[in-house]
Amino acid sequence: MCAVSPHVRAAGDDDVGSVCERISAKLASVRTEECVERELRLSTGRSVQDTPILYKEYAPLSSRKPLGRVLLVGGIHGDEYSSVSIVFKWMLTLDSYHSGLFHWRIVPLLNPDGLLRDDSQRVNANGVDLNRNFPMPAWEDTSLAYWIQKTDRNPRRYPGSGPLSEPETRWFVDEINVFAPDVIVTVHAPHGIVDYDGPKDGPRRLGRLYLSLIGTYPGSLGNYAGIQRRIPVVTIELPYAGTMPKSAEVADIWRDLVQWLTRNIPARLPVAGQDPQDMEPS
């Protein structure tokens, strides 16, 4: 069992409620009451504009040892509405059916400033693409050079002035370090596929989304966690950024994800007497 995150502060109802009201004002599929009822908590993570980053934890049950730890994150890009909405639907499922099979830590919206502004945007309030701001060896020759040479300084892909220059990514890396997930699941849109970075193979299909590797970019979460740290990163790319999948598809993706986690997480955990360094990664 992992340590309880030190990156948590006392959650006032007014703080959580006000963020829920703002989320509901942007997302037609998430009502304020639905957001509040998920009993999200305030982390110590704050956006550039000092908006709290909310999270929910589904901890192990006393009657069952979990197979492993799963870190689920949505809303890395603020204009991908569906990536936030679907996480709320999955939390509703967990609220009813959490069995202790996994220890979940869920961040439905990592980039609140990008989503909650009048005109939602991919980047954060500093104009940084959070999914290009994660650590990378030789930052200027990799992340920065890629942005300049390959994207022609596309402002939607700006990686920032340096690795972890943004408070949102600094907090999220701290969460990875403290929670020590066996798998990270991140939700994006609108490619309509499953992407994967990490040791061995990712899920071939989640619902009607099929595995189609789109590449690992400098400074991305997949590169940082999946390639550099060898933590499997499953990226769910929903078909549309502004439209939620139908309820049946939301349920199908969830069912297939849980089945894949059940088959693959145990392969990463050490058996009694085995040195974790000797494990075959999965």
Image (tube, helix red, strand yellow):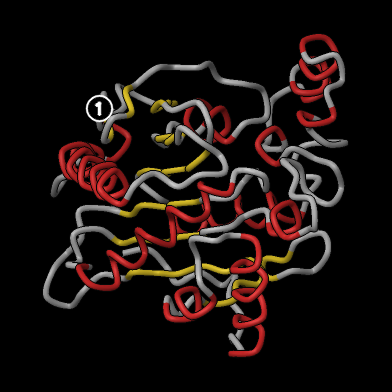
Question: Of residues 20 and 52, which is closer to you in this image?
Answer: 20
Query: Is residue 53 depicted above or below 153 in this figure?
Result: below
**Residue occupying the point 15% across, 45% down:** 271
Query: Is residue 78 depicted above or below 204 in this figure?
Result: below
**Residue occupying the point 17% across, 42% down:** 259
84 left or right, relative to 130: left
Residue 175 found in image quarter: bottom right
Q: Residue 93 appears at what percent x and percent y?
A: 28, 64
249 left or right, relative to 175: left
Question: Of residues 211 and 220, which is closer to you in this image?
Answer: 211
**Residue occupying the point 83% across, 36% down:** 160
Three-letter code, disc 1: Glu
Residue 174 found in image quarter: bottom right
Mark 1 Cα within 10 Å, few/some/many (few <14, many 20+)?
A: few
Q: Residue 206 appears at what percent x and percent y?
A: 28, 34
Whether residue 278 can be seen here: yes
Whether residue 282 can be seen here: no
Q: Quadrant of the N terminus?
A: bottom left
**Residue occupying the point 58% across, 75% down:** 8
Residue 48 found in image quarter: bottom right
Element on which disc 1 rests: loop
Q: Mark 1 points at which residue?
A: 280
Q: Residue 241 appears at what percent x and percent y?
A: 56, 39
Question: Of residues 129 and 45, which is closer to you in this image?
Answer: 129
Query: Is residue 105 depicted above or below 114 in this figure?
Result: below
